Amino acid sequence: GKVALVTGATRNIGRSIALSLAAGGAAVAVNSRVSREAGEKIVQEIKAMGGQAEAFVADVADAKAVNAMVEGAVKRFGRIDMLVINASVRKQTPFADMSFEEWKGILGITLDGSFHLVKACLPHMIKAGGGAIVTLGGMMALAGAKNRVHGSVVKHGLVGMTRALALDLAQYNIRVNCI
């Protein structure tokens, strides 16, 4: 009976999370950054299992697109109970060769995108009396990774954001955890 928004839900971990949440009875708003076709494929898998889902195309780094996606999900399902922030880009570039545009692009998706997503979902979770936000960190958040300075920075920042949000949002009965 819950509603989950899963970003980056068309492949890999995001796909598995979306399918698992649907198998557990949640309606799932499936986010893809660019491919409606990929989103619809997951939606059809969820519907074939007897679940409810809808695909939303939105670049999480774009606040207007995120707001439109969240409003669309609320219009379709009536609420947002869970937000899984999985959207990410994996690039490998030696720091010496990295452009500032590449740096900002990675930060934009992971950190700015997380900000936009939480801000858009928060009023709906408060209205519902609580919720859950899950971010996906990774080993490189603490250990670093060769040719992935930007990826290590954003995941470390996401861990800090998650910890701070957990403290800020507890008063609204919203749990925030990082995997």
Image (cartoon, helix red, strand yellow):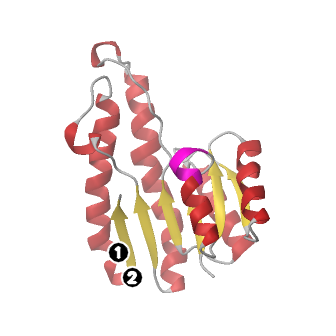
What's the amino acid at mark 1?
A: Leu
Q: Is residue 2 left or right of residue 88?
A: right
Q: Answer yes or no: do the residues labelled 1 and 2 have beta carbons within 8 Å?
A: yes
Q: Is residue 64 left or right of residue 83?
A: right
Circle 2 residue: 172
Give the residues in magenta. Answer: 11-15
What is the number of callouts on the image?
2
Give the camera-side residue of 36 and 71: 36
SS of the residue at dot 1?
helix
x, y percentage for residue 116? 48, 55
As drawn, the residue found furthest toward the top would be: 97
Give the camera-side residue of 153 and 137: 137
Circle 1 residue: 169
What's the amino acid at mark 2?
A: Tyr
Task: Tell me which corner region of the image, top left, top right, bottom left or bottom right, holds residue 4.
Answer: bottom right
Q: Residue at x 72, y 62 (%)?
A: 46
Give the answer, above or below, for where 162 lies relative to 94. Answer: below
Indicate the quadrant containing the N terminus: top left, top right, bottom left or bottom right. bottom right
Q: Residue at x 62, y 42 (%)?
A: 33
Q: Residue at x 54, y 52 (%)?
A: 14
x, y percentage for residue 152? 29, 37
